[in-house]
Image: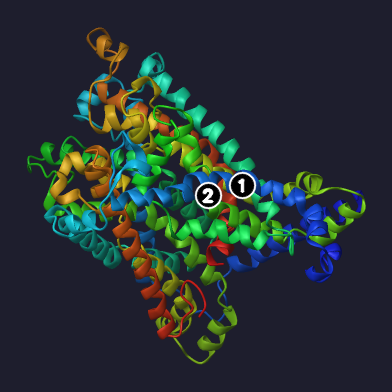
């Protein structure tokens, strides 16, 4: 089995080498293509540059304002576009505020627990359905795919969850959306392509399905696992409607997105220490900076995870499945 | 694939059911958690749709509630608010189709002409990013940029030009939500088109160039036909989803622009179903929408087949 695994690894290395060669080859303009016109290049540059600016400039302004001193915010008349005076006071104050801290804990908890659960359930199901000709896999597949086209919709789902006693319960925020059939199909498509020689060799060595999944299929499909986990995690981190449905009044159970909606988007004053403390700390932090710090806080986990996953996104891990 | 599974290559009839069950029991066991979750949270609500034909009373539950047949639906069809939500949905869907749909295609084609791989990767990384933002976050950013106290108006005030609050103006709401959708999702939308572009054989371009076809002739005769399958697929999906224009996006902004502009079918279901406790009425609105959506998907597919394309599934 170790032999087989090493062969697999050298293959991977060779793949990387050819890929690098292809990349170098593509970087040059093909000889048959006419040289670009100046006007065309300028228009292209402007369009692409404008597109980047529309996304990056607002983020820059938000981040900069969150790090600005009250003086800078005053001089700018609100949002800060050029660095003027920098301070991390808004963050210190935000993290000493119980509302935000609780919300952060709730959001992280829901995201970690939910993603772990979704991944275990989806990986198992995807592998269970990925072996050709196994008993019943077609019927189960149909059962899964049907849910992509027909569903009870908002109110029947709400009635089922509340009927099971989910109102105000943590599980109501996680379980109803924990299985994404789309993600299972993506994983399954990749597992079906796992080298069959490896799997056969392992089976001859006496490995059962659990063993094969754990020591062959999972290690050879890290990219798709990472991307799927990102999608689940982003879904949990971003969810706010479930909160609105199942615990709209329990402010101490609100995740960050709901706090963002209530105190930043709708502009309600934050309860607890921040509101009470505004009189005394106003000289240190502008309310706007504090709001922008909350915005940045919801961004941080995304931006932290994104670099690890984006190269997989770029190579189009999901496109095969989207097209399929 | 047949050599892949020596133990499963034999004709299924050759093995008894019990033998196959024993062989595949761990595979079946692995699907159980997902199947159970889907049965509870996706299939059980299908039975909950029965409430659409009842006068559902939460105190007595689905089994004891009074059956009223199609009363909820006839009430729906006579409700001006419902038709308002329907018109709004179709209008917004149409605006998005015209303004949003071509953008990812154009961007993908433009990006495909960028030669430097590093530049291309950087642009892709940036334009994919907003897709991962929540609607709360995206709308908050829009509000900070374009809202009454936002960066744009801050600038306008300093220049003494007066203010322009697009975030609370019901008249321009369709344009606002469409630009939000473009900002958040258009970059992500290029993924499928980029994949289709990379599948086009470059020899075609070379041959066309040798035959004297210029940049735009090549785009028209090679690139666009190469994208045709994906474009049709995306169009079918878009038409099938014509009645879903985005739920959270409208829910969040309903307070700011008022329900007149922001009520769409999904928010109608929510506000007139859950928020007011009239569950049966909301469920009826939801069911009405689902049935029309299925018909739309089916119709769009028929249309794709009529034009000789695959659409969502092959004929």
Residue B289 vs residue B192, the one in the foreground = B289
Residue furthest top in the image: A280
Residue A313 vs residue A245, the one in the foreground = A245
Residue B5 vs residue A110, the one in the foreground = B5
Viewer can see residue A298: yes
Q: In which quarter of the image is the N terminus of chain B?
A: bottom right
Chain containing the residue with disc 1? A
Residue A128 lies left or right of residue B200; in this view the side is right
Q: Where is residue B313 in the image (x, y as percent from the top left)?
A: 50, 73
Q: Same chain for labels 2 and 1? Say yes or no.
A: yes
Alpha-carbon span between mark 2 and mark 1: 8 Å
Chain containing the residue with disc 2? A
Marker count (numbered): 2
Q: Position of residue B89 (x, y in %)?
A: 23, 58
Q: How crowded is mark 2: few (under 14 residues within 10 Å), some or many (20 or more)?
A: many
Q: Where is residue B315 in the image (x, y as percent from the top left)?
A: 50, 80
Whether residues under marks 2 and 1 lie with C-beta atoms below 8 angstroms apart, the answer is: yes
- The label on residue A180 is 2
Q: Residues within 10 Å of mark 1 (few under 14, many from 20)?
A: many
Could you tell me which secondary element the residue under label 2 belongs to? loop
Could you tell me which secondary element the residue under label 1 belongs to? helix
In the displayed structure, would residue A321 be above or below residue A34?
A: above
In the displayed structure, would residue B115 be above or below residue B223?
A: above
Residue A235 lies left or right of residue B74; in this view the side is right
Q: Identify which residue is drawn at 36% across, 25% down.
A: A67
What residue is shown with label 1? A122
| Residue B10 lies in quadrant | bottom right
Q: Where is residue B133 in the image (x, y as percent from the top left)?
A: 40, 43
Mark 2 or 1, nearer chain start:
1
């Amino acid at each position: 089995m170790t032999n087989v695994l090493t062969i697999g690894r050298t293959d991977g290395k060779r793949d990387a080498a050819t890929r690098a060669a292809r990349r170098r080859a593509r970087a040059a303009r093909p000889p048959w293509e006419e040289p670009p016109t100046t006007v065309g290049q300028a228009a292209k540059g402007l369009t692409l540059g404008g597109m980047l600016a529309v996304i990056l400039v607002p983020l820059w302004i938000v981040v900069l304002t969150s790090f600005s001193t009250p003086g800078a915010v005053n001089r700018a008349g609100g949002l800060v576009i050029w660095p003027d005076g920098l301070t991390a006071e808004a963050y210190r104050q935000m993290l000493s505020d119980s509302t935000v801290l609780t919300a952060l804990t709730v959001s992280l908890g829901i995201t970690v627990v939910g993603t772990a659960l979704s991944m275990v359930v989806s990986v198992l199901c995807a592998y269970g359905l990925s072996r050709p000709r196994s008993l019943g896999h077609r019927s189960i597949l149909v059962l899964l795919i049907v849910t992509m086209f027909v569903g009870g919709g908002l109110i029947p789902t709400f009635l089922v969850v509340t009927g099971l006693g989910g109102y105000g319960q943590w599980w109501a925020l996680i379980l109803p959306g924990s299985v994404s059939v789309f993600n299972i199909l993506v994983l399954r498509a990749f597992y079906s392509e796992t080298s069959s020689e490896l799997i056969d060799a392992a089976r001859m060595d006496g490995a059962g399905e659990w063993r094969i999944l754990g020591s062959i299929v999972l290690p050879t499909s890290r990219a798709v696992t990472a991307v799927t986990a990102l999608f689940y995690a982003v879904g949990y981190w971003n969810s706010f409607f479930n909160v609105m449905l199942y615990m709209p009044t329990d402010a101490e159970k609100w995740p960050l997105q709901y706090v963002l909606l209530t105190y930043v988007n709708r502009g309600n004053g934050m309860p607890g220490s921040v509101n009470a403390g505004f009189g005394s700390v106003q000289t240190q932090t502008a309310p706007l900076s504090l709001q922008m710090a909350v915005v940045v806080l919801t961004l941080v986990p995304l931006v932290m995870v994104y670099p690890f996953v984006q190269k997989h996104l770029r190579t189009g891990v999901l496109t095969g499945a989207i097209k399929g | 694939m047949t050599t892949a599974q020596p133990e499963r290559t034999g004709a299924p009839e050759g093995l008894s059911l019990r033998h196959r069950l024993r062989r595949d029991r761990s595979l079946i066991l692995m699907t159980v958690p997902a199947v159970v979750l889907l049965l509870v949270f996706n299939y059980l609500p299908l039975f909950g749709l029965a409430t659409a034909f009842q006068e559902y009373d939460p105190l007595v539950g689905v089994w004891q509630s009074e059956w009223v047949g199609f009363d909820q639906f006839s009430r729906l069809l006579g409700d001006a608010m419902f038709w308002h939500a329907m018109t709004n949905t179709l209008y917004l869907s149409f605006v998005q189709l015209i303004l949003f749909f071509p953008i990812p295609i154009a961007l993908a084609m433009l990006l495909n002409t960028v030669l430097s791989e590093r530049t291309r990767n950087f642009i892709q990384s940036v334009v994919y990013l907003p897709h991962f933002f929540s609607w709360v976050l995206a709308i908050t950013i829009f509000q900070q940029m374009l809202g009454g106290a936002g960066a744009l108006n801050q600038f306008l005030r300093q220049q003494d030009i007066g203010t322009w609050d697009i975030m609370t103006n019901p008249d321009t709401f369709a344009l606002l939500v469409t630009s939000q959708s473009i900002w958040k999702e258009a970059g992500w939308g290029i993924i499928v088109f980029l994949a289709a572009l990379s599948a086009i054989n470059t020899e075609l371009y070379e041959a066309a160039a040798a035959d004297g076809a210029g940049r735009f002739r090549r785009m028209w005769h090679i690139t666009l036909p190469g994208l045709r399958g994906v474009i049709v697929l995306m169009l079918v999906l878009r038409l099938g989803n014509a009645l879903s224009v985005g739920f959270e996006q409208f829910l969040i902004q309903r307070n700011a622009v008022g329900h007149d502009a922001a009520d769409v079918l999904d928010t109608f279901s929510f506000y007139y179903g859950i928020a007011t406790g009239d569950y049966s009425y909301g469920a009826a609105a939801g069911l009405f929408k689902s049935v029309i959506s299925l018909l739309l998907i089916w119709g769009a597919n028929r249309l794709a087949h009529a034009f000789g394309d695959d659409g969502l599934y092959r004929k």
